[in-house]
Amino acid sequence: MTREGPATAPTRPTLDAFLEAHPATPRESGSDSPRVAALGTSGQAGAVRPLIVTAVLGEPAQSALDALRARHFPPERNVLAAHVTLFHALPGEREAEVDAELARAADRDPPAAIVGAPRLLGRGVALRIAAPAVLGWRTAAADRWREWLTPQDRGKKELHVTVQNKVDPEQARALQRDLALRPEESTRVVALALWQYDGGPWLPVRRHPYRGGV
């Protein structure tokens, strides 16, 4: 996928549209924001933007998660589609190496994934994502890239999609109870996506579909 110029972001775009349009969107605070300060690149003129790596889920799981996020996220904070973050903040100067690794990792059939049980975040809720092949790749990549990693990325041991954040703790507990009744959903990881963090916006760089993915 070649890079294109920025475009105006639609309201709460799907992840596919977000990747295609390359919009500059406002900051989403909380667990979705990479720890830019750890890299010393937050908004400085000429600084290299940190990189974010996400896993893209197939349909209809992605649309269902987008709908949950739209329903339960504070509207002023819901500026991204639902996403599975694999790395929150990799050094921007390593873009070529990271991009090449994503291309290699995606040269296989789409890995299986299960959207599972809710996890309480304190002031929000996430749904656990069981994707052993993707988590295994992520663990191996983190070991190779360990000197680049922030504490947040070094400590990551599981995958999830945040569907609510920055709400009253009782509201979060109520949603966790409701989502505990939701059946597991089987899906596939159809692509790996690379982004830049620009002091607030997520700027799409490239999408690497798995074989037969979109």
Image (cartoon, rainbow, N blue to C red):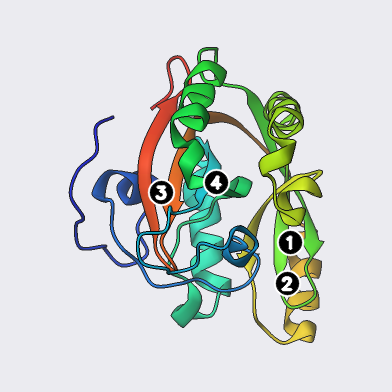
Q: Are marks 2 and 1 in contact (CB under 8 Å)?
A: yes
Where does residue 3 sit, x and y in percent of width and height?
A: 24, 38
Where does residue 67 sit, x and y in percent of width and height?
A: 49, 60
- Left or right of 126? Residue 197 is left
Q: CA distance from mark 2 to mark 4?
A: 35 Å
Q: Nearer the viewer, residue 30 or 10?
A: 30
Check disc 4: other Cα within 10 Å, few if <14, some if 14-19, many if 20+: many
Q: CA distance from mark 2 to mark 1?
A: 6 Å
Q: Nearer the viewer, residue 195 or 186?
A: 195
The residue at the point 54 percent across, 23 percent down is 101
Q: Earlier in the sequence, mark 1 or mark 4?
A: 4
Q: Quadrant of residue 123?
A: bottom right
Q: Are marks 2 and 3 in contact (CB under 8 Å)?
A: no
Check disc 3: other Cα within 10 Å, few if <14, some if 14-19, many if 20+: some
The residue at the point 28 percent across, 29 percent down is 1
Mark 3 residue type: Leu
Q: Secondary structure at mark 2?
A: helix
